[in-house]
Amino acid sequence: MDVVILVSIYGLVINLVLFIMMGVDKRRSKRGSWRIEEKKLWGIALAGGPLGGWIGMSVFRHKTKHTSFKLGFPILSLFYIAGVAYLVHRFYL
């Protein structure tokens, strides 16, 4: 299987995981139950899922008052998008 396909699948899965985690954490916060640690959310974001976290913030209106999330997920998303664009340009164009 081509590396680009594997990386694309990984990107989709890791972003979906963080999107779902944001929704689960929002539901838990409303119910007052056990929450997902912020460092776990950041860990998944750093592993390649910031776009899913950013979309999850918007859809679930979760962590929107936290400056670190409000600024960090979009900035990290832009870095990942720029990195992918660079790699595609460097190796495939």
Image: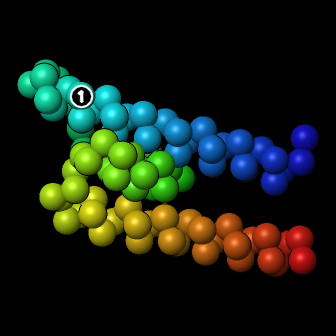
Give the x, y percent position of residue 7: 72, 50
For the point 81% across and 54% down, the residue is 4
Task: Read off the residue under disc 1.
Answer: 27
For the point 33% across and 66% down, the residue is 72
The answer to which of 63 and 10 lies nearer the viewer is: 63
The answer to which of 55 and 45 lies nearer the viewer is: 55
Residue 57 versus residue 31 in the image, above or below: below
Does residue 44 appear in this view?
yes
Q: Quadrant of residue 46?
A: bottom left
The C terminus appears in which quarter of the rendering?
bottom right
Numbered-mark total:
1
For the point 31% across and 42% down, the residue is 60
Give the x, y percent position of residue 40: 33, 41
Does residue 43 appear in this view?
no
- Identified by mark 1, the residue type is Arg
- In the image as oriented, which residue stretches furthest toward the left? 32
For the point 90% across and 41% down, the residue is 1
- What color scheme is it? rainbow
The answer to which of 73 and 30 lies nearer the viewer is: 30
Q: How would you rate the neighbour count of disc 1 (Cα within 10 Å): few for under 14, some for 14-19, many for 20 or more?
A: some
Give the x, y percent position of residue 17: 49, 36
Q: Quadrant of residue 84?
A: bottom right
Query: Does 44 sit left or right of 32 as displayed?
Result: right
Residue 1 versus residue 51 in the image, above or below: above
Give the x, y percent position of residue 36: 25, 33
Query: Does 81 sit left or right of 35 as displayed?
Result: right
Q: Classify mark 1: helix, strand or loop.
A: helix
